[in-house]
Image (tube, rainbow, N blue to C red):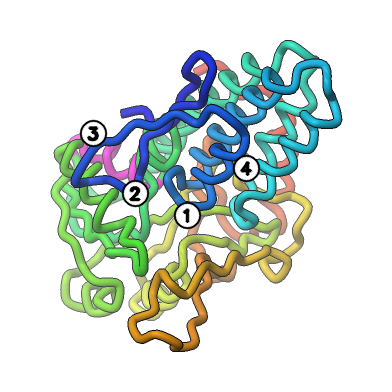
Amino acid sequence: MDSVWYDGDAVGFLDQRALPRAVVRERATNVESVVEAIRTLAVRGAPAIGIFGAYGVALAARLHAGDRAAYEHAAAQIRAARPTAVNLAWAVDRVLATAPGGELDEARRIHEEQRDVDRRIAQASVALFPSSGNVLTHCNTGPIATGGDGTALGCFVAAHRAGKALHVFVDETRPLLQGARLTMFELREAGVPCTLIVDSAAAITMQRKAVRAVVVGADRVARNGDTANKIGTYGVAIAAAHHGIPFYVAAPRSTFDFALDSGDAIPIEERSGEEVRIAEGDAVYNPAFDVTPGRLVTGLITEYGVLAPPYADSIPDLEHRARLPLPVA
């Protein structure tokens, strides 16, 4: 089920807000609707946002052909639609750097690369899992969120197809329930056994259900391994460390921000209090993401293999490899 695509004179997308009750496909025909789809989480998931943004820039190039200033302004609007996921800026800048006329081809190349990257991440992860047992994840990292096979969720599906009897416990992911609505939907579609839990049950699930590993995705990874991901991830990492459970982050190279030394510099999006407010007038602090310190991350699962601490050594090596084409699969 493709979550984003280019549709002639528009950018098509699967409206994630409607899932799982309905499969709704929409078309963004101008830059404003591209930005609106990203801001309102109709399109979400760091890699999917990047691909969607790339197609949005290609659309802007067509709408503003011959007017470079207007084109660059439109691209800047798309780039700023959500601040935390670095994939969006990475993809927008990559299409902007393309020679005129090649924007759509470059966006399609980004999309196809993500499909290949997802497959490689999944392949790199299989050996990390036991032959059977319980695992846990937070938020949504499947095909809907990446435009490919998924990152963390793709790891579980690959292990399942390899014959490993894993049972996935899925955090609901408050306040917008990406885990309950999207991850459960995708795991069921893939035939992977799964159980939904409320976010606050993650620690007791680790304690009582013999969780063997935790795998999550990422929206931005700093050079020291600090990782921004959906709010609640940090607490899951702390609980995993307390129980001695490996905590893995599955992330493509486009999610690594080689310019940031640590997670302290990662911008954290704060969303409207209306997403969580019950009583009118209540003060609300609603960060969309948190940052998990690299010291809590057992390994970073990438298309180049699994990076292990110390990340201050392994991530600069990834930066070097990220400048080169991926080897042919």
Magenta-colored stretch includes residue 198: no
**Residue bounds of the magenta highlight:** 152-163
The local secondary structure at tag 2 comes to: loop
* Residue 122 higher or lower than 141, as above or below: above
The span from disc 2 to disc 1 (Cα, nearest Å) is 25 Å
Label 3 environment density (alpha carbons within 10 Å; few <14, some 14–19, many ≥20): few
Which quadrant of the figure has residue 97? top right
Q: Which residue is mark 3?
A: 162
Which amino acid is tagged 4? Leu
Position of residue 153 measured from the top left corner of the image (x, y, whole percent)? 33, 45
**Residue 231 badge:** none
- Which structural element holds mark 4? helix
Tell me if label 4 and label 1 are in contact, CB under 8 Å.
Answer: no
Residue 28 image offset from top left, x and y in percent? 50, 31
Label 4 crowding class (10 Å Cα cut-off): few <14, some 14-19, many 20+?
A: many
Task: Look at the numbered disc 3 and give the secondary structure of its residue.
Answer: loop
In the rendered view, does 182 fall on the left or right side of 112? Answer: left
Between the C-alphas of marks 3 and 1, the distance is 20 Å
Disc 2: which residue: 17
Q: Is residue 14 left or right of residue 9?
A: left
Mark 4 vs mark 2: in front: 2
Of the pair 128 and 287, the residue shown nearer to us: 287
Magenta: main secondary structure equals: helix
Is the Cβ of the residue at disc 2 closer than 8 Å to that at disc 3? no
Task: Name the residue beneath numbered marker 4.
Answer: 88
Sequence-wise first label, 4 or 2: 2
- When the figure is inspected, residue 292 is found, relative to residue 170, above or below; the finding is below
Q: Residue furthest top?
A: 101
